[in-house]
Amino acid sequence: MQVESFEKVLQSIVDNATAVIYVKAVDGRYLMINQRYEDLFHVARDEIIGKTDYDIFSKPQADAFRANDERVVAEGHPIELDEQVFQDDGLHEYISLKFPLRGNDGRVEAVCGISTDVSSRKQAQDQLQRSLSLLEATIESTADGILVVDRVGSIVRYNRRFVELWRIPDAVLATHDDAAAIAFVLDQLADPEAFLAKVRSLYASPEASSYDKLSFKDGRTFERYSQPQRLGGDVVGRVWSFRDVSARIHAEQHRDHLLADEREARPLAEEAVRVRDDFLSVASHELRTPVASLMLVIQSLEHRLDRFDIDKVRWAVANASRQVERLGRLIDSLLDVSRFQAGKLELKRDFVDLAAIARDVVDQLADQAVRLNTQVTLSSDRPVIGRWDGFRLEQAATNLLSNALKFGLSRPVAVKVSAADGIARLTVSDHGIGIPEALRPRLFQRFSRGVSARSYGGLGLGLYITRLVVEAHHGTIGVTSEEGQGSTFTVELPIDMAGEIATSP
Amino acid sequence: MIDATPSVCIIDDDADIRDSIRFALEIEGYHLIEAVDGEDALTRLHSSDRPICLILLDLMMPGMNGWEFRRRQLADPELAGIPVYLISGGRELPHHAVELQARGYLSKPVALTALLETVGQFCHRDQQNRC
């Protein structure tokens, strides 16, 4: 190739380069520019010869180029530089390689520059930086612990939350070895084998996503998610994320317990409400009966006073008096119940004779026995004296005898008082309807009744009050019964005094 | 002359209630039959030599209660036609009155005027015995 044509070839290469290429003398005057230069800065190569950067660019830019050129001359070797140039469409970033051109004597005679526009590459890099920063901030601000592992099992990335959740020392993570990290965490898990098996199966199938729950020995629970990390179409690793759901699980368990407790308590509460409603209905019936009787008698007296003879009036007054007593007794019972419920059964102990109490009670209920055509026998051969609350024992004995009359089917009723081995005993036996076995355990409970309220009235408090009275005396009450044959109630009270008193004839 | 003045029948286990109704009605000239429960009532109604103009029926009774009595009464052609008034208490009384096909009900405690008005609707007084 001829020298002349070689120059043409070189000129052609230089003109077709995408870089801006130029040669300036050491004093800054242009010796040569390429086609790219002409196009970008709107200047012809013939015109620029002999001109400097100060003729083409603004002074600050020209100063910057000049300084770089002088540096190349001074240092005498190629230098790579970042340079900025204003073009028609704004500021462009260039990487310029500038190198000295020497004459035959070896002195630097000119500076050649090859400047490549890297504006779009720079923008892409900035964009990438912003994306990375966003990713970084997101990974660190999530409440989940995140671990990224590559396909050969090296830890690529993890966040602080991951370290906190798993309590992995920095030294272990510094190895970037996932196996080491797994070995460290296994000990914390309730079922390490299952976890390990799952991890192995996931590493064996890179495409798989999975979800699991991990239970810890210390009671914590994590949810684990695992997704493959893809680059283009290829799986390059795996992202693990862990969420501590212990608080939620505990709350759920707590809620389940509460629900179970509530389910358990509901029938009891419903039963209590039912019992109370039944009691209120029965109590109102019981209170209504004497009031009804009283009202008719009084209103009749009022209405026809002039017509009644004195015997009828006497009868009416006696009847009214009886109803008032009956009401009084009912009210006492109701007050007793609320008193007992408040835990206020205070005994007024004094020396009392249980046999005398039984006799009084039999006398008091004699009228009722006659009305019911029932024969009542009392057997007590001697006084049985103890330090008891006479009023309360009378109440207990009255309840037992009333029941015997009420449920006794007009058959004979026996009341017995005896004492032996420091124990006083009161028994009341009837031969009436008896108590079905199924009802016996509840018999001494509040509002309990051995029979349907549709058949027998009564508050359902008698045996309950009796039991409380007996127990307050540290005594016991029991029943034997056979349906259709009758019942026997036995009260036993400790005689907590200096023995029995000598029998009087 | 046979006394054919009809009787009011009161069925209640509570003697005080029966006594007070007797006290209130006899002075007005009514004749009364008392029964302590359903079974007692069935016997007395059958053996009565007077017609029965009205039954006052309590519901809660030992022995045969009011429900069973009413069932037996309705099944008995001789007694089925006798009007029945319930005399009891509780919020369900109107319900029971419908359930038992009663002519009405008197809620305890019963005012004398209400009792006399009810009985007066169904029964004649005994003119001879009337004071």
Image (cartoon, helix red, strand yellow):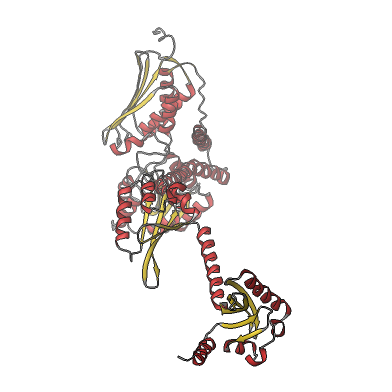
Residue B84, percent from left and from top: 39, 55
Q: Is A201 situated above or below B46?
A: below
Viewer-proximal residue among B60 and B47? B60
> Could you tell me which quadrant the C terminus of chain A lies in?
top left
The total number of labels drawn is 0
Residue ID at (51%, 64%): A135
Q: Is residue A483 left or right of residue A18?
A: left
Q: Quadrant of residue A484?
A: top left
Viewer-proximal residue among A371 and A281? A281
* Most distant residue in the right direction: A59
* Most distant residue in the front direction: A105
Q: Is A8 situated above or below A292?
A: below
Answer whether residue A193 is visible to the viewer in this image: yes
Viewer-proximal residue among A226 and A149? A149
Q: Is A295 situated above or below A41?
A: above
Answer whether residue B90 is visible to the viewer in this image: no
Q: Quadrant of residue A106?
A: bottom right
Residue ID at (38%, 31%): A370
Residue B122, percent from left and from top: 44, 57
Residue A281, percent from left and from top: 46, 46
> Could you tell me which quadrant the N terminus of chain A lies in?
bottom left
Residue A263, percent from left and from top: 40, 49
